[in-house]
Amino acid sequence: MAKFPAMARKDSKLDHLARVRLFSACSKKELNTIGRASDEISIPAGKVLCEEGKPGHEFYLVLEGEVNLTRNKRKLTTLGPGRHFGELALLHRGPRNATATAVSPATLLVLGQREFSGVLDEVPSLAHKLLTYMAERLAEADSKDVSN
């Protein structure tokens, strides 16, 4: 019985990962690999996770609590459980386009760029899914640019 909460927590983590658009086409085995490469961290309210303009190296998935995203010191949104940010940092070390700060104590799943590269080496089929996702993101950004 003592193992059930941990198993429920693992399944919850995988459920959250499956809802991330970047990982939505992944099999349960692929999600398990991503989950194993990730770290679960607990942070206090007020903790700055990443800063606008500074290089990014991690993807974050909120499991519990809330995180504010701000740009130019203006609030963009508040992210709660199941929401994520920083997925582009897994592929590109460019500057962050927002600052992320914990609004409340929070539990996050963190996947670093180096660990993600290891996942791609271990599961080459994931690279194709990733390319599809990136093509969709590029197409969306391009259509927004044309419509403005």
Image (tube, rainbow, N blue to C red):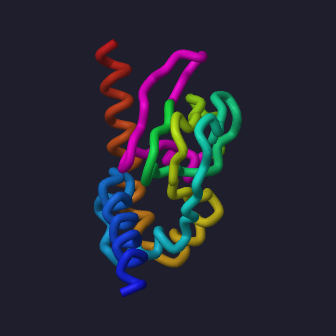
Q: Is residue 71 magenta?
A: yes
Q: Residue at x 56, y 29 (%)?
A: 98
Q: Does residue 1 appear left or right of residue 62 in this picture? A: left
Q: Residue at x 31, y 72 (%)?
A: 27
Q: Residue at x 34, y 12 (%)?
A: 148
Q: Is residue 76 above or below residue 68?
A: above
- Residue pushed farthest front? 1
Q: Which residues are magenta?
A: 69-92
Q: Quadrant of residue 40?
A: bottom right
Give how far across and how far down residue 66 sits, in percent: 46, 39
- Residue pushed farthest right? 54
Between 95 and 2, which is closer to the camera in this rendering? Answer: 2
Evaluate whether residue 31 shows in this view.
no
- Residue pushed farthest top? 148
Give how far across and how far down residue 80 sits, in percent: 39, 41
Q: Does residue 64 appear left or right of residue 8 in this picture? A: right
Q: Is residue 19 above or below residue 136?
A: below
Give how far across and how far down residue 4 sits, in percent: 35, 81
Q: Residue at x 36, y 67 (%)?
A: 14
Between 129 and 42, which is closer to the camera in this rendering? Answer: 42
Q: Is residue 74 above or below residue 15?
A: above
Evaluate whether residue 107 shows in this view.
yes
Q: Does residue 31 appear left or right of residue 97 in this picture? A: left
Give how far across and how far down residue 52 sits, in percent: 63, 29
Q: Quadrant of residue 50?
A: top right
Q: Is residue 99 above or below residue 14?
A: above
Image quarter in which the N terminus is found: bottom left
Q: Is residue 58 magenta?
A: no
